[in-house]
Image (cartoon, grey):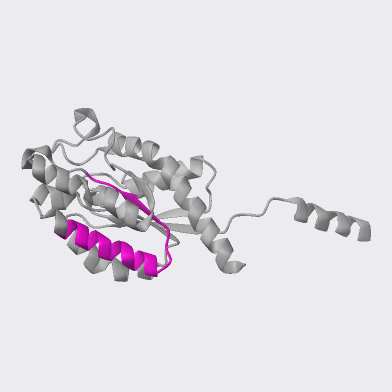
C-alpha cells in the first residue's frame, strides 16, 4: 500500500500543471456587445468558444460591450467595468467616434486616459484599432487613423491594427446596415485576431506568475 501511495504521488507531480483560470474582458461598443446577433454569436462568445477549441479551457471572455458607446462613454464606465476583476482587457472603441465625425484629438484624449487607467490597474491590454469612414475626407481619415498607432507607441499594448480587417465592406459578412458584422463576420474577426489574443493570454499569465513569485 505504501509503495502504491508513493507511486500515485509521483504520478501526480509528473502531470502538467493546470493553468490558472483567466478572465479576459472585451470592452467596447456594439461590435463587442453583439448588435443584431443571436445569443452565442457576439464577439466575446465566439472568441471564448474558439479559445476552447485551441485548448484554453480555463479562459473566459466577458462581454463588457455597450452598443452606441463612443470613446468618451467607454472612458466614463471603464472604472465600474473593472469591478468584474478581469486579468486582461481587449479594447474595441472608436467606431462610433468615426461615424459621428468626432474630432480625432478627442478620441485620442479619451483612449489615452482609458489606457492609462488600465495601466495603473496593471492589466495587459489588446488594443484593436479602427479606421475612419472614408466619406469624411482625407484630412479627417489621416488624423483619425493615426490615433491608434500613436497609442501603441505610448503604451505598448498587444496591438491589432484594424478590428474589422477582412470584414468591413464585405457584404456577405455584414448585416443589412453594412456596418455591423453578422455571425460569419464575427467568426472571421475571431479567426484573424486569435494570434493577438493568444499573445495577450501569455502576457496575462506572465503577470500572474510574476505576482506570485
Quarter that holds the C terminus: bottom right
Relative placement, left or right, of 211 versus 133 is: right
Asked whether 41 falls inside the magenta stretch, the response is: no
- Residue placed most toward the observer, 110 or 81: 110
Relative placement, left or right, of 87 versus 99 is: right
What is the number of callouts on the image? 0
Q: Position of residue 17 (x, y in %)?
A: 66, 54
Corner quadrant of residue 36: top left
Relative placement, left or right, of 172 versus 137 is: right
Instruction: Identify the residue at image location x=20%, y=52%.
Output: 94
Quarter that holds the N terminus: bottom right
Residue 94 can be seen, yes or no: yes
Instruction: Identify the residue at image location x=38%, y=69%.
Output: 120
- Residue placed most toward the observer, 168 or 53: 168
**Dominant SS type (magenta):** helix
Residue 69 can be seen, yes or no: no
Instruction: Identify the residue at image location x=14%, y=43%.
Output: 141
Corner quadrant of residue 179: top left
Q: Position of residue 190 (x, y in %)?
A: 37, 40
Instruction: Identify the residue at image location x=7%, y=40%.
Output: 137
Q: Is residue 124 above or below residue 140?
A: below
Q: Which segment is the magenta one?
A: 106-130
Q: Position of residue 20 (x, y in %)?
A: 57, 59
- Residue placed most toward the observer, 190 or 120: 120
- Residue placed most toward the observer, 174 or 195: 195
Amino acid at each position: 500500500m505504501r509503495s502504491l501511495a508513493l507511486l500515485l504521488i509521483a504520478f501526480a507531480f509528473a502531470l502538467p500543471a493546470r493553468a490558472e483560470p483567466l478572465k479576459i474582458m472585451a470592452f467596447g461598443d456594439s461590435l463587442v456587445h453583439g448588435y443584431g446577433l443571436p445569443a452565442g454569436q457576439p464577439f466575446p462568445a465566439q472568441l471564448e468558444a474558439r479559445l476552447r477549441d485551441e485548448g484554453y479551457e480555463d479562459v473566459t471572455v466577458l462581454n463588457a460591450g455597450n452598443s452606441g458607446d463612443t470613446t468618451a462613454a467607454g472612458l466614463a464606465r471603464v472604472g465600474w467595468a473593472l469591478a468584474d476583476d478581469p486579468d486582461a482587457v481587449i479594447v474595441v472603441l472608436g467606431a462610433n467616434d468615426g461615424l459621428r465625425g468626432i474630432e480625432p484629438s478627442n478620441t485620442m484624449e479619451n483612449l489615452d486616459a482609458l489606457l492609462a487607467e488600465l495601466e495603473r490597474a496593471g492589466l495587459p491590454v489588446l488594443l484593436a484599432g479602427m479606421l475612419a469612414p472614408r466619406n469624411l475626407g482625407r484630412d479627417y481619415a489621416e488624423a483619425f487613423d493615426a490615433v491608434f498607432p500613436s497609442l501603441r507607441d505610448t503604451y505598448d499594448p498587444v496591438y491589432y491594427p484594424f478590428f474589422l480587417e477582412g470584414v468591413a465592406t464585405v457584404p456577405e459578412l455584414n448585416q443589412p446596415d453594412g456596418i455591423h458584422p453578422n455571425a460569419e463576420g464575427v467568426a472571421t474577426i475571431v479567426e484573424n485576431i486569435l494570434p493577438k489574443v493568444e499573445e495577450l493570454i501569455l502576457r496575462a499569465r506572465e503577470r500572474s506568475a510574476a505576482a506570485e513569485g
